[in-house]
DNA sequence: CTGACGTGAGACATCTTTGTCTCATCTGGG
DNA sequence: CCCAGATGAGACAAAGATGTCTCACGTCAG
């Protein structure tokens, strides 16, 4: 039976998110295939990570598309975005920590595209008066990634309920820890 | 001349924060010593990471002490805390991503102590009415770690000015991205 | 039925990293 | 000055991961 490339990538992402140093053999076993077959589909560890990166970028872009970032209030767009991104957070958390590994090499342009779209959303919110202007769009974008990763990790560690993930991330990102004075 | 253990640990932290997979040889060269000497001071890679963990915990506990978390408004205590933690964020960011590696093994009890102190601070803020109650203290603690790591990474990548680090982290954590309606 | 195709299992050489050891060199205190 | 202690450089084997290959087996289409 032909191997399901998508399913292999998903189980690899799940394993590598928990243990970033997992060997090719462990990845193969986690996917329920042999190391030889894994190698037939992905030339090496690098190729596997690159494929995961492509998958992660594709999922994020799909989430960004589905969230319709240009529609309605920016805050609502952020809420839709986090909800859409939720299923990709495991993979995203892994790639977020893995990015630092590609030191000298150029990073995938997909990240730049995503950054641009997210940054534009936060800038739109600032220009509409919804978001404060002392936090730069670039930082808000970074913070979103960081909170998604922290949230994913907290969920796997059992410190946050899976159902609360989106609420915890979105509410902290938008509203912060302080109680609102106004209505 | 006897090796300065502290200085070795600091340069190791700086390198490993950028490249988590650096070899012992790279760590040694970064510290300006030979691999043999590095090995005389740290039995192996594990021992090195453990020593970095001890250093990170010690720095965090010192910062927590200096921030006097029990004094005055909880929000002000958080501001002091982030300011005090700023110098340790590089090391903290590395340890934050490295923690996932100690899968089966027990993790250093120092983290549990720190978690307890930070969680207590957020709980105090909730009980005093400063902080909202729909974000759990455990999540706020995780989010603080995540934002510190994201901020440290954003600074090294040049996306955030080093001088803005504490402001960006604290303001997002406490106030969020939305503009305040009230005064 | 039969053959092509993909897979699993394992062998194998290679490469990298690691941990240990030896020896020459340097430095600082007595 | 002289020696003890620490360091640097390099050799070395062991361990682990990787990439490649072969061969047997199962499956599916023709």
Image (cartoon, coloured by chain):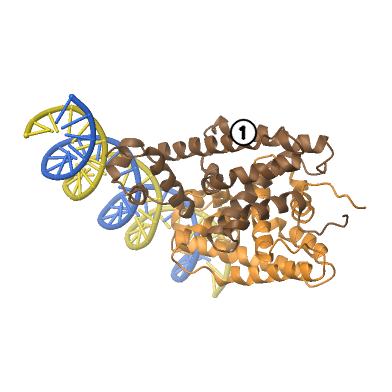
Chain colours: A orange, B brown, C blue, D yellow
Q: Is residue B108 above or below residue B30?
A: above
Q: Position of residue B71 (x, y in %)?
A: 72, 33
Q: Is residue B153 above or below residue B120?
A: below
Q: Is residue C4 above or below residue C22?
A: below
Q: Quadrant of residue D20?
A: bottom left
- Is residue A156 visible in the rendered image? The answer is no
Q: Residue at x 75, y 36 (%)?
A: B72
Crowd around label 1: few <14 · some 14–19 · many ≥20 (10 Å): some
Looking at this view, name the residue that lies furthest to the right: A183
Residue B26 as seen in the image, left or right of residue B17: left
Q: Looking at the image, which is closer to me, B10 or A29?
A: B10
- The quarter of the picture where the N terminus of chain A appears is bottom right
Residue A130 as seen in the image, left or right of residue D23: right
Q: Residue at x 72, y 65 (%)?
A: A63
Task: Say which element carries label 1.
Answer: helix
Residue A173 as seen in the image, left or right of residue A95: right
Q: Quadrant of residue B100?
A: top right
- The number of numbered badges drawn on the structure is 1
Q: Position of residue A84 (x, y in %)?
A: 74, 61
- Is residue B83 visible in the rendered image? The answer is yes
Q: Position of residue B67 (x, y in %)?
A: 65, 37
Q: Looking at the image, which is closer to me, B174 or C9?
A: B174
Q: Is residue A84 above or below residue B63?
A: below
Residue B7 as seen in the image, left or right of residue C12: right
Q: Looking at the image, which is closer to me, C27 or B136?
A: C27
Residue where numbered disc 1 is placed: B65
Q: Quadrant of residue D18?
A: bottom left
Q: Position of residue B77 (x, y in %)?
A: 71, 40
Q: Residue at x 75, y 39 (%)?
A: B74
Chain of the residue where label 1 is placed in the rendered structure: B
């Amino acid at each position: 039976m032909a191997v399901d490339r998508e399913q292999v990538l998903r189980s690899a992402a799940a394993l590598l998110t928990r243990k970033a140093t997992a060997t090719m053999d462990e990845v193969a076993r986690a996917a329920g295939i042999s190391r030889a077959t894994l190698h037939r589909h992905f030339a090496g560890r690098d190729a596997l990570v690159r494929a995961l990166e492509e998958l992660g970028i594709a999922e994020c872009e799909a989430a960004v598309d589905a969230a319709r970032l240009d529609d309605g209030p920016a805050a609502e767009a952020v809420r839709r975005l986090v909800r859409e991104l939720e299923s990709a957070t495991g993979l995203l958390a892994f790639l977020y920590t893995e990015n630092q590994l590609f030191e000298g090499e150029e990073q995938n342009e997909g990240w730049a595209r995503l950054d641009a779209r997210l940054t534009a959303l936060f800038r739109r919110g600032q220009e509409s008066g919804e978001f404060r202007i002392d936090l730069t769009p670039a930082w808000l974008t970074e913070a979103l990634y960081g909170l998604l990763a922290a949230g994913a990790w907290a969920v796997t560690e059992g410190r946050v309920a899976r159902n609360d993930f989106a609420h915890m991330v979105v509410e902290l990102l938008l509203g912060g820890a302080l109680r609102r004075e106004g209505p």
